[in-house]
Image (cartoon, rainbow, N blue to C red):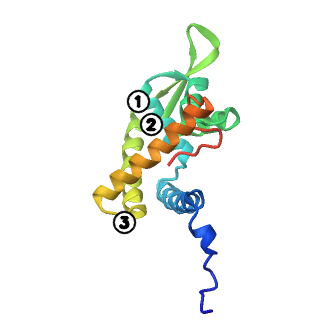
Amino acid sequence: MDIEEGTPPQRLRALPSRLTNQAALVANRIVDRALAEAGARRYHYALLAASEEYGPSSQAALGRRTGIDRSDMVATVNDLAERRLLERAPDPEDRRRNIISITAAGRRELAHLDELLAAAQEDFLAPLGAADRRTLTDLLTRLVDHHRAEQGWTTPGPTSRTG
């Protein structure tokens, strides 16, 4: 038998779940590398995107919208606040809670990260034409939405990562 040493068994190569995982690993590496160019991580992008889209929100609401765990949320908000990309202010209705808002600098950074991620998506999807890209996105969305509904998730899954 003349099989390349790194070739997995056919049973593994035929499993959609394994192929999806392998593609996700490649996509994550490409996205992480693109974000690193700007000194950012996926959590940074997720928080900036959610803050821009939903407006001022509590840390808890942002965590639910992005799937970022509470323990990671504080550190990520602290990091972005230190860089003046997000602002944290006490909630006037409940002083124990913080309201997080994106700053003008945060909007500029988000636009820059959008450009980097668009290039990363192009890199990841390079072997696919436009129709295949739309089909892949549709199929993956249907899978995620189905399993999210089946599990009763209202936000990204418990091990969700952005990008």
State the residue in front, 71 or 125: 125
Up-down relation of residue 81 to residue 127 (above or below): above
Q: Are discs 3 and 2 less than 8 Å apart at CB?
A: no
Q: How far apart, in angstroms, are the residues tagged by discs 3 and 1?
A: 28 Å
The image position of residue 131, as x and y in percent, is 29, 56
Residue 50 position in % (x across, y down): 47, 32
Count of numbered circles in the view: 3
Label of residue 122 in the image: none
Residue position marked by numbered label 3 in the rendering: 126
* SS label for mark 3: loop
User: Mark number for residue 53?
Assistant: 1
Q: Are marks 1 and 2 in contact (CB under 8 Å)?
A: yes
Instruction: Examine the rendered structure and indicate whether residue 79 appears above or below residue 9.
Output: above
Q: CA distance from mark 1 to mark 2?
A: 6 Å
Q: Is residue 14 visible?
A: yes
Res. 52 image quadrant:
top left
Mark 3 or 1: the one toward you: 3
Q: Label 2, on which residue? A: 49
Q: Residue at x 39, y 33 (%)?
A: 104
**Foreground tag (3 vs 2):** 3
Q: Residue at x 57, y 63 (%)?
A: 22
Amino acid at circle 2: Ala
Q: Splitting the image into 4 quarters, where does residue 95 fall? A: top right
| Left or right of residue 64: residue 119 | left
